[in-house]
Image: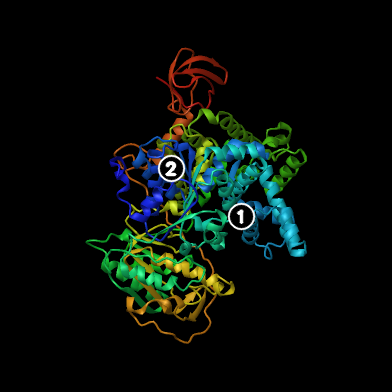
Amino acid sequence: MNNHMEYLDKLNPQQREAAVHKEGPLLILAGAGSGKTSTMTHRIAYLIREEGVAPYHILAVTFTNKAAKEMRDRVEDLIGEGISMWILTFHSACLRILRKHAEALGYDKDFVVYDPTDQKVVIKNCIKEQNVDEKKYPPAYVLSIISDCKEKGISPAKFAEINGVDFKNKIILDLYTAYEAVLKKNNAMDFDDLILRTVQLFERNEDILADYQQKFQYIMVDEYQDTNYIQYRFIKLLAEAHNNICVVGDDDQCIYQWRGADIKNILDFEKDFKNTKVIKLEQNYRSHANILEAAHSVIEKNKGRKHKKLWTDKEKGEKIKYYRADDEKEEARYIAQEIDRLHGKELAYSDFAVLYRTNAQSRTFEEALSAREVPYRVLGGTRYYDRKEIKDIMAYMRLVQNTADDLSLTRIINEPKRGIGEKTLEKLRALASVRNESLFDALTDDDIVEGLPSKAVDSIREMISTLGQFSREKDNLKVSDIYDGLLVRTGYVRNLEQQNTVEAEGRIENLLEFKSVIYDYEKENPQMSLAEFMEKIALMAEIDNHDAGENAVVLMTLHSAKGLEFPVVFMPGMEDGLFPGWRAFEKPDGVEEERRLCYVGMTRAMKRLYLTSAELRTLYGKTDYTRESQFLKELDKSLVDGDAIYEKKSSQGSFSGFGASSGRNPGWSQGGGNDGYSGNEIFRPFDQLKYIKQSQTTGSGGKAGPDIKDGDKVSHSKFGEGLVISVDGSTVTIAFDSVGIKKLAKDIAPIKKI
């Protein structure tokens, strides 16, 4: 064996076989905790180091930014840093392609990406404009149909063809059509569009597809069991030329069918790609043997699966603990008490996870843990980026990126108050529509602004001027400069300060916390553009918010836990009607998907696994006696300790849907500069606010000021040092050492005299 291949020695025989496979389709069936990331990264290293494949010929696709970052870091550990290679999520890869070729689809390359909150606003407006009853057609329901259509590649015209146009379908069709028109007019795409439009780009432009097929000669896909139809099409189109496709996945962990994932993609892979080599990774490195045996005793009841059985050379470990509580409050008290008892020498609070079926279950655990003063955090509640003030400031930033974004302008035109009421806004919309232009363009017309209510004229002029200035200069400014400028010059922060309430202070602190988010990204990429930053924020998945470094018990849904692992796992609510939920019994393979979810939860546990249920449960305001989950009955009883699992007569349980959990505010980092601010003292948010405002009104890092003249040496926050060649009215021309000559807007250029 070549000594230079010793990096492969850490792999087991099956992992190594997969890592050194070069040509042709490869299906790696990787069980939970079987080292799939290690196998994939070693295969990439092998292709580059031993087979001489250029890194830019490899595409690796994952589902979360967290997984992509981990893979990238591990590849760099094996082959060195700075290698240009696409290791990205599906959405990031497609976004990168669309940024380059958007014009071929009739979009401007500065298109914006709408997140679920933005989509809801658009569809609500469409429902209102079409006089549709929102109670009969709730926005979430309509959006789920639109999303489902896009994931299956079904256009509005195709929808009509498939479903016919009875009364209900006609309303859905009209709303889908209107929704698409609004997005197109605003030069915007939603998340589903990113993949759908890329597939359309490839299907309509053979030359562009051929270029990417030539570029990506080796394709690897992580979590293949979670792909939907349109993701499958994207991968299939790219792989057709060279057929060197390697997919890694586990059919036993396909838990996103409700979100469009199609388990057939992995089950039928060998039919799709002829001469596929199949390698099973069945050795588990995560869990003790009893946990694996117990999980297998449940999952083997599924009919729609490929045969495999995880094993480990770890010790048997503790048996699974089962506890049957009187009610959900006692269940939560028991779990809090066990965490308190076990926490100590070997286990930190962050080693514990409570994984529940629905968000609505979290409240009782929050109360029980608080009562014992056990630190915890909820994953999957209100995301930090969904808070009002963050959404507002991001709308301002999106307008700087793309002034045609009517949705963002509608959101902030009266944030802070500028005297524009709903009626005035309706008139403006109608006027812009008649003139076939964006709201922003309409408001650049003096005649239109003069016709606004008198108290609105000056503030609207100021807003449009500020946005226009930053938009024109966006390539000459760091993202943090744009952010500081918008905070101050739009009057947003001033308005919050004047409110003088605890809530307003909290909002200001969140806005300043967002500055540290920007700084963190700028540290990684000092030349980051506004478009790149907005993309990073838009593409953040919930799992990317999991910070394993924070010492707190993690509360999250079973769906959110996929890909994570914890020494101690609690799975409460093991009752028919809750888990599996009643809905599962309505679909042919519904219980099989819930059983896979149960398997995913159990295999998150490394050392100890607790399953609990409550005899009496109040959920969504309804109290019921419960029946123990059928999954408990499927367990190999020789592996379980604690209460006996028995069947008990009960009334029908209440329907278990999805609730919402309250998010927790991330705490401030203190000192040390890790939070994006320098200095050793404890960081005080309002000192930073004072600095931002000074820098926007003086020459201290905010704008050029009147004292800059020809011949001055200056420093620019993005371009470094330079020499002022000329100052002409509102423009200053500077020769920079790094980028040559630049013309900048004097008012907002982040320069200061040296």
Figure check: 704 above or below 383: above
**Residue at point 39%, 49% (across, down):** 19
Viewer-proximal residue among 451 and 376 = 376
**Which quadrant would the C terminus be assigned to in this image?**
top left
Residue 358 seen in this snapshot: yes
Q: Secondary structure at mark 1?
A: helix
Viewer-proximal residue among 595 and 715 = 595
Q: Which residue is mark 1?
A: 151
Q: CA distance from mark 1 to mark 2?
A: 31 Å
| Residue 564 image offset from top left, x and y in percent | 39, 58
Give the residue type that dot 2 points to. Val
**Which quadrant would the N terminus be assigned to in this image?**
top left
Viewer-proximal residue among 68 and 441 = 68
* Residue at the limit of the structure toward the bottom, as seen here: 649
Viewer-proximal residue among 235 and 412 = 235
Mark 1 or mark 2: whose residue is earlier in sequence: 1
131 displayed left or right of 280: right
**Residue at point 33%, 74% (across, down):** 321
Which mark's residue is nearer the viewer, 1 or 2?
A: 1
Q: Which residue is mark 2?
A: 517
Give the residue type that dot 1 points to. Glu
449 displayed left or right of 86: right
Q: Secondary structure at mark 2?
A: helix
**Residue at point 44%, 15% (across, down):** 712
| Residue 716 image offset from top left, x and y in percent | 45, 24
Rendering colour mode: rainbow
Figure check: 135 above or below 193: below
